[in-house]
Image (cartoon, rainbow, N blue to C red):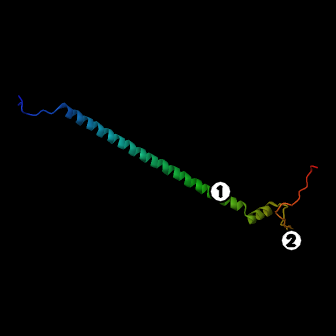
Amino acid sequence: MNRLKSASRTPLSTFVIVIAAAIIVAGGGSLHAYYKNRQVQVNRDIDTIEHRVEKWQLDISTTKMRSEDLLNRFAIRKQLEDSGSKLRRIPVGLPEEVNPSPPSAVASAMP
């Protein structure tokens, strides 16, 4: 009905401030959800990359093991014998020791 003139009215600025605060809170909540989802996605990407690195390290160690097996002199000797190769062992006294230092004088083809 009729209001008393002494009753206080709520100013319009209060409603504007409440609405602005609600918008800010809603925006903050949505940004929080976005950042949290992004953080989860980055963690998944990191886990995927770590899994790939572990797989590559396993592949590297497997390759090293296989190359060491291929360079094993006993295995090479066995493979040569199995394939009927004409290569034979060198007798113990046959190899000569070579001095690794270069000679002091080198012959030159230029006069």
Looking at the image, residue 57 sits to the left or right of residue 74; the answer is left
- The alpha-carbon separation of the residues under discs 1 and 2 comes to 36 Å
Badge 1 density bin: few <14, some 14–19, many ≥20, Cα 10 Å:
few
**Number of numbered discs on residues:** 2
Find residue 90 and report its horizontal and vertical position in percent. 84, 67
- Looking at the image, the residue that sits furthest to the right is 111
- Left or right, 34 with respect to 78, comes to left
What is the three-letter code of the residue carrying label 2? Answer: Gly
Residue 15, percent from left and from top: 20, 33
Image point 38% across, 42% down: which residue? 34
Q: Please, is residue 4 above or below residue 60 in the view?
A: above
- The kind of secondary structure element at disc 1 is helix
Give the residue furthest to the front. Answer: 111
Q: Earlier in the sequence, mark 1 or mark 2?
A: 1
Report whether 22 appears left or right of 66.
Answer: left
The N terminus lies in quadrant: top left
**Along the line of sight, the residue nearer the viewer: 50 or 15:** 15
Q: Which residue is mark 2?
A: 93
Q: Which residue is mark 1?
A: 63
